[in-house]
Structures are given as C-alpha cells and as structure tokens.
Image (spheres, rainbow, N blue to C red):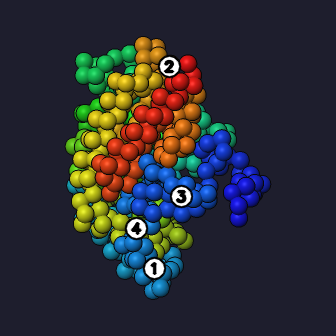
Amino acid sequence: MTKDEIIRKKQEYLFNCVTTYFKDPLVIDHAKGQYVWDLDGKRFLDFLGGIVTISVGHSNEKVAAKIKEQIDRVQHTSTLFPTEALVALAEKVAQIAPGKLKKSYFSNSGTEANEVAITTARMYTGNYEVLALRHGYSGHSQLTKALTGLYTWRKAGVIPYGIVHAPGPYCYRCPYGLTYPSCELHCAKDIEEVIKTSTSGQVAGLIAETIQGLGGFIVPPPGYFKIVANIVRNYGGLFIADEVQAAWGRTGKKWWGIEHWEVEPDIITSAKGMANGVPIGLTLTRPEIADAYKGLTISTFGGNPVTCAAAKATIDLIEEERLMDNAEDAGNHFHQGLEALKEKHSLIGDVRGMGLMQGIELVKNRQTKEPATEATNLIMERARANGLLVGKGGLYGNVIRMSPPLNINKADVDQALAVLDKSLGEATATNS
C-alpha cells in the first residue's frame, strides 16, 4: 500500500480514539537497531522506542532467532498446558526479582498486569479500596482507567468506585507549593491523611508507577516510596510498584526502577520492554500473596510460548551485555546534555529522568510555569523533520519523553541532542 492508502484505511477502519503523532502521520515501513524508516525511505533515530518498549533494538537478531526457533517448535498452547518457555521465563524473573518476590502471572499488557495486581491485592487483604496517584497512568480497561490520574485518559463514563487518588510526587509542580528537600516529603506523608479522610481506613493497597510515564516522566524524590509503602501497610494494604515502563534495566544499573528507592514492593507489574516489543504483561509477587488468588483462571494468550521465548531472550541479552550499565552511562550523558540545552533554551523548564528514560518539560515562562503545549507539538514536528523521533506526555501535553533502546551509544545521544537543539531553536524562531 502507499502511505495515503494506509492513512485512509486507518481512518476508515480503526477507532478514532487510536491516536497518532504528527499532523501528517508517520507510516513506518521497517526498523533496525536504533533506527526506523518510513515508506519514503527516510531514516529516523528512534528515541521513543515504541513507547519505552524497544529494549535491545529493533529486529534484534538474537531475540528474533529465539522467536523463530520457538515458532518452529510450538506457537500456541494457552495456560492449560505448561511449556518449557513459560517456566523458564518464570524462573528467570524469580532469579532477578527483588526480595521474596517469586511467583509470576503472565498476561498480554500492562493493563492486564495491573488488573491482576489489584484483584490479587483485594483477595489477599480482604479489603477493597485502592489508592492511586494523580498524574499516574494504569491502562485502558475500566478498572485501570479509574486508577489513572489524567483526565484525558479517563473518558467513557469511568466510575472510580473504591478508588481514591492522592497527590503525586510532582516536585516541579508541587501541589503543596513546597520545595524538596525542605518539604520533608510532605507528599508521601500526606498519604496517611488521604487514607484517614477518604477511605474506610482499611485499604487493599496503593499502586504507583516508579516513574510516572504518561504523566511526563515524573521522578519521585529519594525516600518517597519508603514512607508511602510503610503507611499503606500500616492500614492493611499492599504496595504495588507499577514497573510497566521502568523495569528491565531502563533506569540504569538495576533491573527494577523501584530498587533505586531501596524498597521491596509486595507486587510488581511490568510489560513493554520485557519482550522487546512482543506483547506481554507480568504480575510478580510473593508466594503467599499469589496463592491467595481465589478461583480458577486461564489465559488464552498470556504466557504464550513465543512471547515467553522473546522475553527470556531479551532479559538474557540485557544481562549478558550489561545493558543496564550502558543505560546508566549513556543516560547520565544524555541528562547532562539536556541540562545544557536548558541553559540555552528558555522553553525548557525542567529536565528529569533516570537512565534512558529522560524528559524535558516545556513552559512559556519559567516563573509562571505556564505549559508550552503548542510549542511541544511544534518541536516534535521539527524533530521529525530533522530525523529524530521522540514522544510526549504530561497532563498538559508539554513534556518531551525520550526512551531509546538500552544498547544505544553516546554518539547516538549526541546526535539526538543536536537535533533537539536545532528543533528547539526552530520552534522558538517560529513563535517569536
């Protein structure tokens, strides 16, 4: 098909809510490593990575070989029949899991992983009410839409029964008007006040993204999760770390983002980068919590042998090549470069992130912090024209999100920084 045919048929046959970037949608034809090509043959440096999903590069030969090998052996069974691929992945996850987390439930997405986590927490604790954070994103089912703290992703008559949202750890736009560290982590301590005033006092748990992804790569301050986890447990609940985006070495040095906060969650959920783009979801917890799940369940596609083979191959490759270390080194280099761009371009109000999960929040004025939403869209358009793909997020759509493959090098980072510099300049000139 031609590009125009694909776009026309997308509009005709797909839900309109399936949104795309850019005024003129980008139709990707093929991809390899850190690059993607459109139908016209133009190459782009991919610093979005399928929304924090391409961990070891597009069409990675080692992962693809394992996928092909498994397809030739058996492609599908369902969870009614255990396979070597399924248990090998579960064992590997248990080996690298923090603390006593050992048992896995595999599904197809982060949405499903979060659904399983909430259901399991309710069964284990005997409590129903759940806390979530403002600016968080949990998925697109009815339950996970209700957990989400961004109005643009909560349409369709969501009724958040039994769910309470607490202010999040958004230091750049602190809801209390305070500044870290003199704030003494008021946002974390206020979770107890929320429980006392907005719940029955007995909760099933709190679910929180380690780094809020769609919210704009919001990074909680040091010590935040220790306080939050202790409070929630004191009121009968479990601490659920949503690692859909932050796991698998992306934050640098460690397998799991939450490990940077020195906290062992009761449940971890993940997806995205776990299988380098092959659909998968993970709910990981301690045996006694997993065993509290009542009734029988099956999953037609969860734990699919091909998917499990892809995930195991991806995790093995990250481990063998120490890509979490590269994420730390390249990520620090990237962060420093973004800080330098902040000094040069007044549009950048904040630089934040960990490892190869970096974001810049764009504002019209640094004093008022008025979101520069239109400028963000323009910068994305200019970056595309200049050969770089990035994402966006934030409540106001004014945060550029960047999550390249973990095996990029500093030269790739420098190229991305140069394109961002050029695109920021072009956007400023257009608006002036």
Residue 208 visible: no
- Residue 175 found in image quarter: top left
Is 401 on the left-hand or right-hand side of 6? left
Q: CA distance from mark 2 to mark 4?
A: 40 Å
Against 153, is 48 above or below? below
Viewer-nearest of labels 1 and 3? 3
**Residue at the top extreme of this rendering:** 367
Mark 4 and mark 1: Cα distance apart in space: 12 Å
The first of marks 4 and 1 along the sequence is: 4
In which image quadrant can residue 260 be found? top left
Q: Which residue is mark 3?
A: 37
Viewer-closest of 279 and 125: 279
Q: Position of residue 119 (x, y in %)?
A: 47, 53
The x and y percentages for residue 236 are 34, 41
- Identify which residue is drawn at 48% across, 46% down: 388
User: Which residue is tagged 4?
Assistant: 60
> Tag 4: residue type?
Asn
Q: Nearer the viewer, mark 4 or mark 1?
A: 4
For the point 57% across and 22% down, the residue is 431
Q: According to the image, label 2 marks what residue?
A: 364
Give the residue type that dot 3 points to.
Trp
Pointer 1 residue:
68
Q: Earlier in the sequence, mark 2 or mark 4?
A: 4
Q: Amino acid at mark 1?
A: Lys
SS state under label 1: helix
- Mark earlier in primary sequence (2, 3): 3
Between discs 1 and 2, the one toward the N terminus: 1
Q: Residue 327, image x and y in percent? A: 29, 50
